Image (spheres, coloured by chain):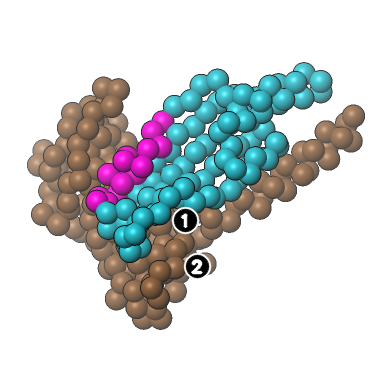
Chain colours: A cyan, B brown
Amino acid sequence: MKKLLLIAAIATFFAGCAVGPLPGVIYTGADYGLDATANTVGSKVGTAQAQAILGIVATGDASINTAAKKAGISRISHVDYKVKNIIGVYITYEIYVYGE
Amino acid sequence: MKLQLLFFLMCFSGMMATAQSTDKYMKVLYRDSVNLYFIKPLDFKPENTKLQLEADFTYNDYSYPSALDSTVVMNFTLQSKSPIRELESVHLGNQDFSTPGEQVELFFIEQQKGDWHSRFSLSMPYGQFKALLEQGEEMPVVIHTATESYRFTGHKDWAKMSAACLSVFP
């Protein structure tokens, strides 16, 4: 049990910078707003994702450019993102770009 | 200590159960009297090919409550060993809903870690999409190029996503 808690504590420590403005030590699953422009809200949505394991290995491409490109968006209206964090062991970062 | 561990697991499983909602499969946005439903990317199971297919869907419910006039955009990525620039047609579902290649737009092709990613887009009437949702996990997708035909099926995630969507869509 002590080893489990130690692993969780270390993972949480290392993952702390990636859990968004409302970090949950055991579990985080929350949506946040990242940015908005003066463009009207469009009818297209694109998403991109990156993930990290144990706060040690991180892969993926959660850039606004990639998310916009995947939906054929050239005028961005706003950008949201979602963070999921399970005890710092597995973290996903999803970005959602809206526009036309 | 065992009781503490049991309590921890119960709390954690409770949170995970809460997360199994429509939010897992879609994002909903209300804008100017239009509901925008974005169905998150899903992987399809390859049947006769080593290609990978991932697709997401965007449904703009322009005419609620007569939503059958609305359209759904399917954006999909084919991951392959050689670049795919052009499609002959895309068949969705068992009712032979077919989209000819000239109505399938190519967004981009790029190479990542040795694989080619070809990103395409097509649109379909909402009524057709709703029929696809009602087909369960065996929902077939057949993509024809000039030389090959690639067959995929919907996987369990398709059935779960469909159930979530049908509980929300008009």
Image location of residue B167, percent across then percent down? 52, 67
Mark seen at residue B59: none
Is B167 above or below relative to A4? below
Q: Exactly how many numbered labels are in the figure?
A: 2
Taking the view exactly as shown, the residue that stands out farthest to the front is A38
Asked whether the residues under the numbered discs 1 and 2 touch, taking CB atoms below 8 Å apart as contact, a structural biologist would say yes
SS at circle 2: loop
Quarter of the image for the N terminus of chain A: give it.
top right
Query: Residue at point 51% right, 60% down?
Result: B164
Chain designation of label 1: B
Q: CA distance from mark 1 to mark 2?
A: 10 Å
Q: Earlier in the sequence, mark 1 or mark 2?
A: 1
Q: In this picture, is B86 found above or below B94?
A: above
Residues flagged by tags 1 and 2 on a common chain: yes
Residue for badge 2: B168
Q: Residue at x 38, y 33 (%)?
A: A61
Amino acid at pointer 2: Val
Within 10 Å of disc 1 (Cα), the crowding (few <14, some 14-19, many 20+) is many
Which image quadrant: the C terminus of chain A? Answer: bottom left
Q: Which residue is mark 1?
A: B26
Magenta stretch contains residue B125: no
Q: Which residues are magenta?
A: A60-74
- B2 or A95: nearer the viewer: A95
Residue at x-position 33% and y-position 64%: A40
Question: Residue B97 appears at what percent x and percent y?
Answer: 24, 61
Are there few (<14), some (14-19), or many (20+) residues within 10 Å of tag 2?
Answer: few
Q: Amino acid at mark 1?
A: Met
Where disc 1 sits, the SS reads: strand
